[in-house]
Amino acid sequence: MQKIFLCAISNIASGSCNEDCAFCAQSARYNADISRYKSKPVAEIVDEARKAAAAGAVGFCLVTAGRGVTDLILEYVCEAARAVKKADLGVKIIACNGDATREQLAEIKKAGADLYNHNLETSERFFPRICATHLWTDRVRTNENALSAGLALVLGGIIGLGETNEDREDLFKAIAKFKPMSAPLNFYIKNPALPIDLEPLGIDEALFWVKRMREILGEAPRIMLAGGKEQVFGDRLMDAIAAGANAMVVGNYLTTLGMDSGDLRDMIFRAGHGVAAPEDCAMMFAAN
């Protein structure tokens, strides 16, 4: 039996990003049919965190759309982090707010965040094919800043964008160098508004890359199945645990619906696994 770590996402500022990432419906350049708002009431964020904890989440991620942390975003994210921390829900707080300096990240940590998420997305070589408004090395720098500020990392990427197998290998190797606590693996699902027009990966191909990611990253990090997992794996989602995954996003994503949290937990239990509790997450932090 494995204990599967669950993480929930709160999209606290949606759809206002000016970057041109070709896989992202939050880019304002593509006019995707999504909800757009500058900020979500902090009380609503805390309520989402409370529901996430009740659903078994041990991680709760505060996500803002945009290139990076401005003064206004910093103030807002810190306010939200403090409010979730004060609620004492037993969740680890993850901030995901784009490019950030060491000083900004130190403030976010001081407000209560435990981890920072800024995915590398793909290999350095392939990155210019999917984004022209910032550099892959900008993402690397932010992760270095997060570590320097004392935050643990949630660091992953997305496959199925048209990249080669070599690109996937290089992405995983780049992630491994950072020794993240958690490594999200997203699967591209095409959207009529986005420029990438590719079908989702097949199940067997996706399972191969989950297994390969585990081989490259080693035993320590949680490999977290994230966006696109429902569409790619369907009723074979638990096969991905056998392949090496041991964490999943529970509930909805940034702009799309996810599997019902009760259904996901039931699937995990039926497969003979358990769901990690806050004390399991605390033990992982203690070990690091």
Image (cartoon, rainbow, N blue to C red):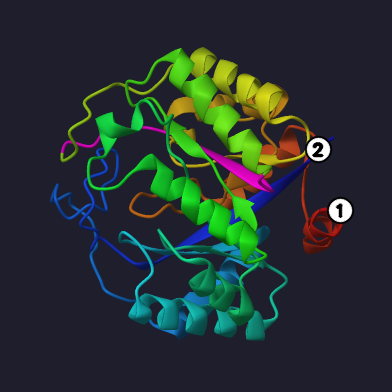
Mark before the other along the chain sequence, 1 or 2: 2
Vertical arrangement, residue 141 with respect to residue 54, above or below? above
Q: Quadrant of residue 195?
A: top left
| Secondary element type, mark 2 | loop
Which quadrant holds the N terminus?
top right
Direction from residue 274 to residue 233 in the image, left or right: left
Q: In the rendering, at what x and y percent does residue 283 appear?
A: 86, 57
Q: Is residue 19 left or right of residue 223?
A: left
The residues colored magenta run 180-192
The correct choice, above or below, for 186 with respect to 240 in the image is below
Q: In the figure, 39 relative to 264: above or below?
A: below
Question: Which residue is painted at 45% across and 41% down in the image?
Answer: 227
Q: Amino acid at mark 1?
A: Ala
Distance of label 1 from label 2 (alpha carbons): 18 Å
Question: Crowding near pointer 2: few (<14 within 10 Å), some, many (20+)?
Answer: some
Residue named by callout 1: 287
Who is closer to the viewer here, 29 or 233? 29
At x 23%, y 56%, the residue is: 34
Residue placed under numbered mark 2 in the picture: 2
Residue 136 drawn at (x, y percent): 39, 41
User: Label 1: how many residues lie within 10 Å, few (<14), some (14-19) or many (20+)?
Assistant: few
Q: Name the residue nearer the viewer: 149 or 242.
A: 149
What's under tag 2, amino acid-wise? Gln
State whether residue 186 appears in this view.
Answer: no
Q: Is residue 182 magenta?
A: yes
